[in-house]
Structures are given as structure tokens and as C-alpha cells.
Image (cartoon, rainbow, N blue to C red):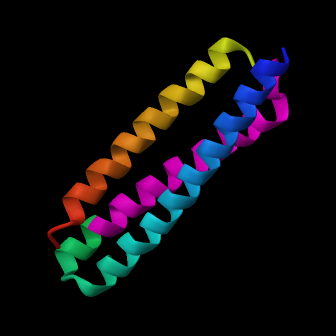
């Protein structure tokens, strides 16, 4: 039980660091949008809005995990991992898409 508690704590720390990094990336995307032409700017702003909503949702799930800690069910933890994987995929895609702008 103590080992599972440690694992949850380490996972939460890792996820919090990733959220912080993604938040920084969002700000970079916004700054990039300000420097681009109207069509590209609109596309970046739409992407940023979607990512921000997904980031907020991930943050809520992380807070739930922090509250439940080691009592979180395997199903709940699996749901968080799946959501995280999707969010990472979206950020990676956006990063690659906006590199050339």
C-alpha cells in the first residue's frame, strides 16, 4: 500500500511538470499567433483554444487523482493515462504544425 502511494505521488509530480510545460507551450503558440498573418493566426488561435480546454480538463483530472491518491481505482487511473496520452498527442501535433510558421 505504501509503495502504491509513492507511485501515485511520483506520477502526480510528473504530470504536474508536464502540465506546466504544456502551459508554457500554449503561451509560445499565442505569441506565434500574434506574429502571423490573419488566416494562420486564426488557425493557431483555434488550436490554442482547444488545447487550453483540454489542458484545463487534464488539470481537473489530476486534481481528482491528488484527492483520491492511492484510493483511486485502476479504472480511474487508466482514464487519466488515456486522457494524458491524447493531450500529449495533440500538443505534439500542434508543435509540429506550427514549427514552420
From the viewer's perspective, is residue 90 above or below residue 1? below
Residue 99 as seen in the image, left or right of residue 29: left
**At x 43% / y 34%, what residue is drawn?**
85
99 to 87, vertically: above or below: below
Q: Position of residue 50 (x, y in %)?
A: 42, 54
* Place of residue 55 in the rendered image (x, y in percent of width and height, measured from the top left): 54, 51
In which quadrant of the rendered view does residue 37 lie?
bottom left
Looking at the rendered structure, the number of numbered marks drawn on it comes to: 0
The picture places residue 78, in percent across and down from the top left corner, at 57, 19
Q: Residue 100's quadrant in the figure?
A: bottom left
Q: Residue furthest bottom?
A: 35
Relative to 76, say whether 35 is above or below: below
Please identify the residue farthest to the left as the structure is shown: 100
Q: Is residue 49 left or right of residue 14?
A: left
Name the residue: 35% across, 62% down. Answer: 46
Q: Residue at x 59, y 43 (%)?
A: 58
Front position in the image: 60 or 69: 69
Asked whether, in this view, residue 71 is left or right of residue 32, the answer is right
Segment tinted magenta in the rendering:
44-71
Q: Quadrant for the C terminus, please.
A: bottom left
Image quadrant assignment for residue 28: bottom left
Percent coordinates x, y for residue 13 in the rendering:
67, 45
Residue 95 magenta-highlighted: no
> Is the residue 54 above or below the residue 79 in the image?
below
Residue drawn at x 57%, y 23% is 79
Amino acid at each position: 500500500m505504501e509503495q502504491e502511494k509513492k507511485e501515485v505521488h511520483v506520477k502526480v509530480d510528473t504530470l504536474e511538470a508536464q502540465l506546466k510545460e504544456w502551459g508554457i507551450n500554449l503561451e509560445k503558440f499565442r505569441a506565434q499567433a500574434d506574429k502571423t498573418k490573419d488566416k494562420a493566426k486564426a488557425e493557431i488561435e483555434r488550436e490554442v483554444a482547444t488545447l487550453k480546454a483540454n489542458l484545463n480538463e487534464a488539470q481537473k483530472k489530476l486534481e481528482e487523482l491528488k484527492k483520491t491518491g492511492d484510493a483511486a481505482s485502476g479504472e480511474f487511473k487508466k482514464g487519466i493515462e488515456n486522457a494524458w496520452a491524447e493531450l500529449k498527442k495533440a500538443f505534439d501535433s500542434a508543435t509540429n504544425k506550427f514549427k514552420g510558421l
